[in-house]
Image (cartoon, rainbow, N blue to C red):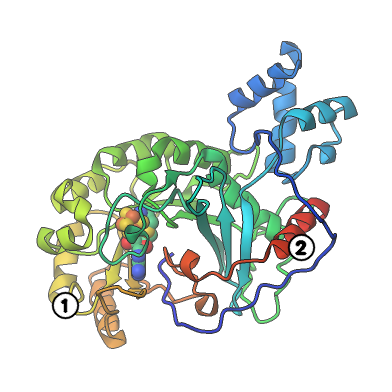
């Protein structure tokens, strides 16, 4: 999430040790998290559940997993002990492993997650996930890839090579981890531990109410997994976050934009960042393949656009590069006729980056121009400064947990 970062002392993650574990052996079993109903039926069939029962069993598991947030089969009391034991012999309900959790004074939370698939000699794949509470919503910023193949020149993720795509389970698993840690499953009803001065959504009953695919990676270069994960997150009988509260951000993979509309049906955000191909080629090199005109044509054709259902154009404010009033005029000209809102993002510098964030009064002038032209143009308030909760640079600065803290956290997850 592109939030402005100030090198401040990182809040030390607080952990309560609930059990002392000496050794931990990673389960050598597949997780059922992220499987479709058809795949779950196959899993049940594979452990001998008769065909006539499959639908009902899948329904039960789905409920425990995605309504109740069960972390082990034991909790699934509507199934027989024998079936639970059989499930436990073959499968887990594991989400990605939490390596670090940091909580900002403003309530923003950041998790560093380790994925499976270590390669000898290489660090294990890790991604970040950030929770941003506001008074009217709680937004979770979710990652889709470890690294990115695109090299946007202002983005730190762009400097990291693509390690691998996330699976549907690892993408949906981020939402589950956030709900686990926030106590946001049905029947839990707890509030974040650090409520104190922190912002907490007061509307509705959910702490995680909105999802943005704006973490690490280009979601449209991992289309199938993102599609399957969002289907789980939006499923009415499960997590049930409305598709209107799910936003997928793309740097402009034009051929796949129609499929987002037709097959995922969520809201679309487009990382525009410039109004001429010359500047955009520099900032978002993918523009050389899919130039602005083609990108905007795909946006115009996006299904279901109305004033209540608008495309978000993201625009990172880079001093002297794309932040003049002439740029603002160009922006308004370009998006004319598209139901749109514009997200002005203060550039988030990272060590070695070649840009500076625009001056604050320039951002305000730009915003004012866009607003007067009739577009909502919120400037994203920097959040989570004290924990550096910023897109693509979280991992490099996150304080790693000691092995002991990780075990304690795992123990907590198992006993909560
Ligand atoms: N790959 C997708 C989604 C992830 S990036 C995309 O590019 O849209 C989410 C948003 O953060 C994008 O708009 C991206 O351009 C922006 N971003 C990346 N690095 C940033 C930085 N250092 N400062 C501000 N915004 C940044
Ligand atoms: Fe990848 Fe998005 Fe960063 Fe570009 S801005 S490098 S597409 S994550």
Q: How many marks?
A: 2
Horizontal side, residue 215 vs residue 173: left or right: left
Up-down relation of residue 211 to residue 82 (above or below): below
Mark 1 crowdedness (10 Å alpha carbons): few <14, some 14-19, many ≥20: some
Image spot of residue 265 (x, y percent): 42, 40
In the rendered image, the quadrant that contains the C terminus is: bottom right
Quadrant field for ligand 1: bottom left
Residue lying farthest top? 51
Horizontal side, residue 331 vs residue 186: left or right: left
Which residue is denoted by mark 2 in the rendering?
Answer: 190
Determine the secondary structure under disc 1.
helix
Q: Which mark is residue 325?
A: 1
Q: Quadrant of residue 311?
A: bottom left
Image spot of residue 290 (x, y percent): 18, 47
Who's the residue at 41% across and 34% down the image?
263
Image spot of residue 159 (x, y percent): 32, 60
The CB of the residue at mark 1 lies under 8 Å from ligand 1? no
Q: Pick whichever of labels 2 and 1 is earlier in the sequence.
A: 2
Is residue 141 in view from this perspective? no
Up-down relation of residue 376 to residue 367 (above or below): above
Q: Quadrant of residue 46?
A: top right
Q: Quadrant of residue 349?
A: bottom left
Image spot of residue 8 (x, y percent): 51, 84
Who's the residue at 52% across and 39% down the image?
168
């Amino acid at each position: 999430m592109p939030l402005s970062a100030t090198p401040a002392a990182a809040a030390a993650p607080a952990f309560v040790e609930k059990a002392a574990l000496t050794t931990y052996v990673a389960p050598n079993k597949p997780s059922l998290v992220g499987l479709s109903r058809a795949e779950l039926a196959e899993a049940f069939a594979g452990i001998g559940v008769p065909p006539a029962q499959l639908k009902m069993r899948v329904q039960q598991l789905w409920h425990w997993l995605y309504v109740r947030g069960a972390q082990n089969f034991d909790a699934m009391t509507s199934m027989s002990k024998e079936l639970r034991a059989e499930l436990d012999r073959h499968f887990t309900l594991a989400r990605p492993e939490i390596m670090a959790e940091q909580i900002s004074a403003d309530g923003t939370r950041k998790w560093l997650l380790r994925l499976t698939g270590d390669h000898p000699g290489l660090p294990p794949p890790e991604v970040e996930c950030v929770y941003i509470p506001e008074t009217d919503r709680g937004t979770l910023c979710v990652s889709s890839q470890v690294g990115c193949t695109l090299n946007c020149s202002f983005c730190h993720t762009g400097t990291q090579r693509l390690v691998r795509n996330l699976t549907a389970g690892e993408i949906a698993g981020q939402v589950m981890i956030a709900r686990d840690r926030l106590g946001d499953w049905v029947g839990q009803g707890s509030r974040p531990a650090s409520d104190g001065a922190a912002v907490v959504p007061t509307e509705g009953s959910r702490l995680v109410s909105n999802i943005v695919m704006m973490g690490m990676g280009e979601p449209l270069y991992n289309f199938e997994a993102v599609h399957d994960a969002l289907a789980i997150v939006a499923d009415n009988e499960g997590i049930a976050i409305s598709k209107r509260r799910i936003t997928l951000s793309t740097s402009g993979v034009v051929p796949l934009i129609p499929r987002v509309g037709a097959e995922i049906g969520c809201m679309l955000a487009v990382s525009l960042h410039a109004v001429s191909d010359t500047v955009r080629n520099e900032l978002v090199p993918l523009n050389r393949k899919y130039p602005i005109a083609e990108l905007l044509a795909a946006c115009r054709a996006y299904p279901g656009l109305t004033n209540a259902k608008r495309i978000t154009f993201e625009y990172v404010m880079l001093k002297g590069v794309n932040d003049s009033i002439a740029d603002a005029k160009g922006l308004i000209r370009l998006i004319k006729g598209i139901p749109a809102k514009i997200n002005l993002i203060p550039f988030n510098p990272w060590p070695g980056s070649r840009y500076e964030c625009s001056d604050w009064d320039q951002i305000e002038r730009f915003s004012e121009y866009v607003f007067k032209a009739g577009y909502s143009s919120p400037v994203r308030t920097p959040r989570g400064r004290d924990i550096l909760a910023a897109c693509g640079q979280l991992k490099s600065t996150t304080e790693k947990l000691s092995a002991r803290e990780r075990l304690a956290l795992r123990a907590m997850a198992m006993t909560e």
